[in-house]
Image (spheres, coloured by chain):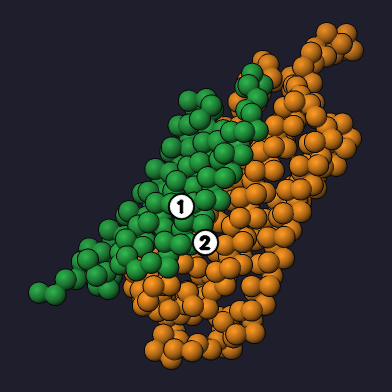
Chain colours: A orange, B green
Amino acid sequence: MADSEAILAPQEPGLRHHFDDSAQQLESSTLGMWVFLVTEVMFFGGMFGAYTVYRNMYPEAFASTSHFMNVTIGAINTGVLIFSSFTMVLAVRSAQLGQKKALIAFLILTLILGCVFLSLKYVEYHEKWVDHHIPGPGFQYADSRYAHQAQILFYLYFAMTGMHAIHMIVGAGLLITLIAMSARNRFSSKWYTPVEMIGLYWHFVDIVWIFLFPLLYLIGHTK
Amino acid sequence: MSHQVVSVRVYAAVFAALLALTITTVAVSKIELGEFNFIAAMTIAVIKGTLVVMFFMDVRRASSMTKLFVGAGLFWLAILLVFLLSDYLSRGWLLNLRWLSRPG
């Protein structure tokens, strides 16, 4: 047993015994990650479907809510998230090149940008609280014609941005794990699959926001 | 692990394009274009999403199998949205749609 282990000792770091080589292992990881992301597309797709139906049922009410959305913060947050995707892709690139310091620096930068996004989201949620725009018994709306219908939009707003924020928090936890792993020299230019896979997750969360921003913030500004 | 490393310049160009498209989508939302406002916003969002998927998520260099799975995911999302809307529209539950309920 000890002999066979010695013979089978991985030539390539990170290679598990049930894979032929690193390329096959990376291919499996990438495919598996994408299968997970497709389930996430379906998950968010259900909420986008609900949004589509209700927006078409109550177009005027939905358009009227845009005046109570903080477009400035929404736009800044879009930029922050895109910037964090950029730093994430640079982190993966640093891992490919085996640059440990740059890898850690870009991961920390990505984490900071994620926290900036969440902090601005907190400011927005606080505004909604102060304005009584949280759906429920305390909900108040300036235009009494749309009070009930606008509540549906704010319900969708909190469901969609809330689920998105939870994904960001999970992503922040994953980034902290990656930073700790990099600091312990777990990655090399030969094996950095977790960096790449969590990168895919981070970009996916970015794409969700790319669609949420125009749908929730920019629907009725010309009216 | 055979992928060649992409130069920072490519990633920076994609980043700049994404920022420019974000500014464009905010600017276009302030102009009255009727139904075209929604079409423009969604077109820009799809372009941005495609840039992220192709370059940042590196699907343009991924294996055919991965591309097939990504495509299947989008196809299933299309089934969800198209059949949902066809159901609501054919029952006449979305009469607010302006282009469907022209006077007459």
Contact? badges 1 and 2 (CB < 8 Å)? yes
Residue A34 visible? The answer is no
What is the total number of numbered labels drawn onto the structure image? 2
In-image side of A13 versus A71 (left or right): right
Output the chain of dot 2: A
Which sits in the foreground, A21 or A201?
Answer: A201
Secondary element under disc 1, as helix, strand or loop, is helix
Residue B11's disc is: none
Which sits in the foreground, A143 or A14?
Answer: A143
Residue B45's disc is: 1
Residue for point 34% across, 68% down: B32
- Residue A152 placement (x, y as % from top left): 47, 76
Q: CA distance from mark 1 to mark 2?
A: 9 Å
Which sits in the foreground, A31 or B36?
Answer: B36
- Residue B75 placement (x, y as % from top left): 39, 43
Look at the picture and state if A207 lies above or below A103: below
- Residue A46 placement (x, y as % from top left): 46, 58
Output the chain of dot 1: B
Residue A213's disc is: 2
